[in-house]
Amino acid sequence: MSRIPSPLFNCQQATLLVERQADAPLPVRPRVQLWAHLHLCPHCRRYALQSVRIAHAARPAAEAAVPANLALPAAARARMRLLFDRREE
Ligand SMILES: [Zn+2]
């Protein structure tokens, strides 16, 4: 992890830490810096709250079993093939 110079680091760094914190606990220093930033920044506070809500809402879909016979419809496969072919040109 890169070194963060101050508790008042920018919002881009704060939102990155919010996302990292969703995957694993942060070390003490970045956790305290994020806590300080979230106390001072209503935008990142809102981002952090929404991130938790989205993760909670998406969890059932992420944990659902994918049927073995699940296949993309032929029309969707054709659209994707067209997009891939255009990128290769
Ligand atoms: Zn912020």
Image: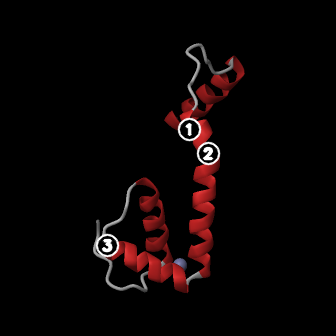
The residue at the point 38 percent across, 56 percent down is 24
The residue at the point 63 percent across, 63 percent down is 50
Q: How many marks?
A: 3
Front residue (pair 72, 19): 19
Q: Give the labeled residue for mark 2.
A: 58
In the image, is residue 11 above or below residue 79?
below
Q: Residues within 10 Å of mark 2 (few under 14, many from 20)?
A: few
Marks 1 and 2 sit apart, C-alpha to C-alpha, by 6 Å
Kind of residue at badge 1: Ala
Q: Give the labeled residue for mark 3.
A: 28
| N-terminal label among 2 and 3 | 3
Q: Residues within 10 Å of mark 3 (few under 14, many from 20)?
A: few
| N-terminal label among 1 and 3 | 3
Q: Give the labeled residue for mark 1.
A: 62
Kind of residue at badge 2: Ala
Could you tell me residue 77's position as x and y percent?
63, 23
| Badge nearest the viewer, 2 or 3 | 3
Could you tell me residue 18's position as x and y percent?
48, 65
Using the rendered view, name the quadrant where residue 42 is placed.
Answer: bottom right
| Badge nearest the viewer, 1 or 3 | 3
In the image, is residue 2 above or below residue 58?
below
Q: Disc 2 on helix, strand or loop?
A: helix
In the picture, the quarter occupied by the N terminus is: bottom left
